[in-house]
Amino acid sequence: MDDTSGTAAVHFDFSGVRVLVTGGTRGIGAAIAAGFHAAGAQVLITGSAPDAAGYEALPPHAGYLQLRLSERGDIQAVAASAGRIDVLVNNAGGTGGAFTPYDFDTAVSVNLNAVFHLTEGLADALAGSRVRGGASVVNLASEMSLFGSPYFYGYGAAKAAIVQLTRSFCVSLAPRGIRVNAVLPGSIPTPMTNPFAEDPGVHKMVCDATPLARWGEPREIADAVMFLASPAASFVSGHTLVVDGGYSIMK
C-alpha cells in the first residue's frame, strides 16, 4: 500500500471478475465502480435514467442498465439481462432528497425490497461464479441502521433491516457458494449528503464526534466493499463492516 494523502490506497486484483454496482452513477456507487474497474473487473452499473446519456460523467468503461428501484419490472429486467455476475453490490437507495424524505412505503420499497428482489433474481447467476474466494454480495447500509432519526423513518428502518437481510441471505445463499456482507458507511460527502457536509456547523459537529476527526471519502467505502468481495475475505460472511472513523463508538 502507499499513502500520499492521509489515507491508504489499497490494491486488489479483480481481473476476469464481473461486477454489478447498483446506483453506480455518482457518489459512493461511482467510487465503488471505479475502484473495481481500476482493479481489472468488468463493471456494470445501474441508474434511474433510460440510458447512460442521462448522466454527465460515469465511471470509465462501465456498462449501463436502467434500474428504478420502485419498479419491479426494472428489477426483473436487470436480473434477466445482467448475464454472468460474480459480485453484486447493492448500493442504490436514497432518502428522496436531503430535506424531502420519501413516504415510509416508498422508502422501504426503494431501500429494502429492491435489494431483496434483485439479490433473489441474481442468485442463480451468482451461484454459477467460479471466481477465487466465491461469489459475493455486498449491501450498503447506513449510520441510520444504528441511530434513530426524527426525519427519515422509512430510510432508517429499511437500512436497519438491510443488516438483518444480510444475515438471512448469508445463511440461505451459503450452500450455493455465495457470501453476503454489508458495509455501514459513516459521514461521507456525496450528492445526497452534501447539504450537511457543506454546512460548517454540521461538518464541525461530525468531526468533533469522530475519533479520527474528519469525514470519510467515497473511495474509503469502495475499499471496504472491495475487501469484502475479494478472496482476502473468503471466510467472511454475514458481517456488517462499519466504516465511520469511530463515530459509532462515541454515540
Image: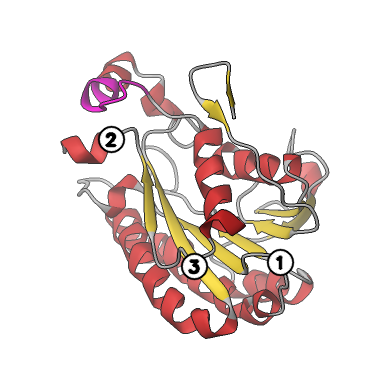
Callout 1 crowding tier (Cα within 10 Å): few <14, some 14–19, many ≥20: some
Residue ID at (39%, 26%)? 215
Find residue 27 and report its horizontal and vertical position in percent. 56, 37
Per the image, label 2 sits on a secondary structure element best described as loop
Q: Which residue is mark 3?
A: 180
Q: Which residue is mark 2?
A: 246
Amino acid type for the residue under numbered disc 2:
Gly
Find residue 178 and report its horizontal and vertical position in percent. 57, 74
Q: Alpha-carbon distance for marks 3 and 1?
A: 15 Å
Amino acid type for the residue under numbered disc 3:
Val
- Please give left or right for residue 85 compared with residue 192 in the image: right
Callout 2 crowding tier (Cα within 10 Å): few <14, some 14–19, many ≥20: some
Q: Which residue is mark 1?
A: 131
Q: Alpha-carbon distance for marks 3 and 2?
A: 23 Å
- Please give left or right for residue 198 compared with residue 173 in the image: left
Q: Earlier in the sequence, mark 3 or mark 1?
A: 1
